[in-house]
Amino acid sequence: MAKRVKFKLNGTEVEADEGRLVIDAAKDAGVEIPHYCYHPALGNPGNCRMCIVEVAGAPKPQVSCRLPVKEGLDVKSDSPAAKRAQASALELHLVNHPLDCPVCDQSGECGLQDYYMKIGRYQSQVREDKQHKGKRVEAGPHVMLDQERCILCTRCTRFVDDVTKTHELGIFRRGHTEAVELTPGKVLDNDYSGNVVDICPVGALTDRDFRYQVRVWYLDKTDSVCPGCSRGCNISIHTNTKRTWHNQGHRVARLKPRHSEVNGYWMCDEGRYGYRPLDEGRLGKVLRLTPERAELSWEAAAVELAARLKDGGSKGLAVAASGMLSNEDWAALKDLFPAAKLYFTAEPDQVGAEDALLKRREKVPNLKGAEALGLKSGSFDDLAKDLESGKVSGLWIVERDLTKVWGAERAKALIGKAGFSVFQGPNKGGTGELASYRLPATAYAEETGRFTNFEGRVQEYRKALDPIGSARPDHEIFGLVKAALTGAALEAAA
Amino acid sequence: MAMTEGTGPAAPVMGKGSMTVRVVERPKRTFATQIFLIEVWKGLGVTFRHLFVNLARHALRALGITGQPGAVTIQYPEDPAVLGKRARTRHRLLKREDGAPRCTACLLCETICPAKCIRITAENAPDAMVEKRAKTFDIDLGMCIFCGYCAEACPVDAIHMDANEVEISSYSRKDMIWNMAELLGDAPKVPGGTA
């Protein structure tokens, strides 16, 4: 426990841990000191000179990102002298900045724009031509580099040096030709390359996936949790729903990491660009496919399915689920199918590479949630055997594409052997055509729920989009069928 | 914002900033104003002044004494509409010297448009120094309110409202949408066309 000391910030007395950086202590106290190079996770080289403050007794202004708090320190970040120093630093950053904000993807969330509006010197004193450097350099599969826009804060090079330790980027040459460049022979293609776009305070590093898709001020932002693996990184879903002609008609424009204890400031590229399948082959209608194809209302479907469940009894019932279910869904599933055999382990379809930083082996977010409820999974091989021998009277598939587990041909043959089968999920996938009933469920971005990550941490994700068609969250569907089974009023369950 | 004009006594007003207020005294109600008759006669005076001045002007012009006509009703559409030099008319997209559209698809016009009648999608421009250009640029003139904000917002002088065209009606809502080639003047606007 560090010693608490008192120091003066802009004339008011503030308490902070001794030795804490003034820039952090000020942030805790609600005072934002402008900065570019300083990043809590990447250190404080002090090269951007933006966080400059006036310190009583010091002959010159100091950079607050390298100034530790001590008893009796008197710091002013908004005095005329400090503001003048900050404005001068910003002016230097802008000497060679191309000011191509209209075509820059960063504009709207750019550090230069923000601080220019706050503390800028609105009269340019530059009489020289701007230095020209590389435009539109493809740094890697996900990142586009514009050397002209760069202010050489070195956040990106520190990220590839300290966090991923892959060293793809570096600062080369000096003076006015100094620039961020790829290390010779390397491409910025590590598993976390998208993060350099987030940490870049200007438009030097932009996302190729997001490039020219939609301007940032059209986006709505919703707090969520990445469903890409069992880490459960905190993310923000950026959606474009009001101007549908942008972003090629896709609703989700991009995912950005949110700072949390789980993931720090980062997220992996797999998760970041993993939102694309969200709107592929979406289901919106409640359908009976066999014996005769018909569109049903939710109530009619619940009554029919309840009858089927009573028929076959829940004895021979098997439920194939996946770790995509929220805690609420698991609880409702347990409630509806107390005696059914459950299968939800991560088979090769949901297993991938893991690493020491964030990525986990199971590529679904919530297997731990099922475990916490005491649900036990059988192996999919056993399920296949049971189906083969005709032991399964009914098969209920929840958000799992069995064609990816067993292969298309085998899955078709096996599902056909069940007495009746239900597919419930947001995307059609390969299994959507094989079951006898098809129920549309909401995707994670369309519902509010909780995932339990591999550490057992329960995290809430929020509804960012409206459901498609008549899709409903899984737990609501389970509740509806349960109500039909017990004869309760269906409206109350819905 | 401080109001600088006005000569009346300035009084400080509670609230944010330092706003000065000019106090204007209400005109007193008197018998002369309350019977209204005086004002009615004044108004009729204006009407008759215009009548006789115009009558005189028309008469002088008919006799060939002066060339200046009196105020007349324009026989539109038989006679063409006379537009002021700065009239805001149909939009026009401009080109660079090399013939490429000036528009860089920054979407500022689309953003500021209060009627939301502009729809732009962007793509990479072949020239890296230009960076970005419009792939499609549609204006729904059926929704446009001709406020001129788009021309004002444009940082590259790519959109003007000076095509001097006001006759842009059509038989369908779809035909009110002009695409990029039509706005650039590269393709004529054909009813039932491609837009």
Image (cartoon, coloured by chain):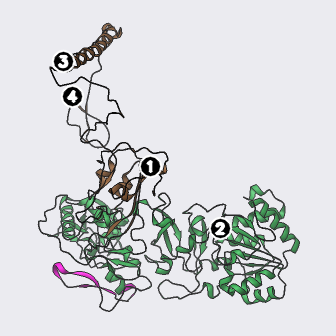
Asked if labels 3 and 4 share a chain, the reply is yes
Please tell me which residue is depicted at 71% across the width and 75% down the height of the picture.
A433
Q: SS for tag 4?
A: loop
Q: At label 2, which amino acid type do we have? A: Leu
What is the quadrant of residue B127 in the picture? bottom left
- The image position of residue B31, as x and y in percent, is 32, 7
Please tell me which residue is depicted at 19% across the width and 25% down the height of the picture.
B68
Q: Give the class, few, some or many, for how many residues have Cα within 10 Å of label 3's Cα (few <14, many ≥20).
A: few
The magenta stretch spans which residues?
Answer: A162-187
The N terminus of chain B: image quadrant: top left
- The image position of residue A262, as x and y in percent, is 50, 77
Asked if labels 1 and 2 share a chain, the reply is no
What residue is shown with label 2?
A283
What residue is shown with label 3?
B63
Answer yes or no: is residue A268 visible: no
Q: SS for tag 1?
A: helix
Asked if labels 2 and 3 share a chain, the reply is no
Q: Closer to the camera, A328 or B87?
A: B87
The answer to whether residue A116 is left or right of residue A42 is left
Discs 1/2, front:
1
Please tell me which residue is depicted at 25% across the width and 16% down the height of the picture.
B55
Q: Give the class, few, some or many, for how many residues have Cα within 10 Å of label 4's Cα (few <14, many ≥20).
A: few
The answer to whether residue A296 is left or right of residue A55 is right
What residue is shown with label 4?
B9
**Letter of the chain that mark 4 sits on in the rendering:** B
Q: Colour of chain B?
A: brown
Discs 3/1, front:
3
**Mark 2 and mark 1 in contact (Cβ < 8 Å)?**
no
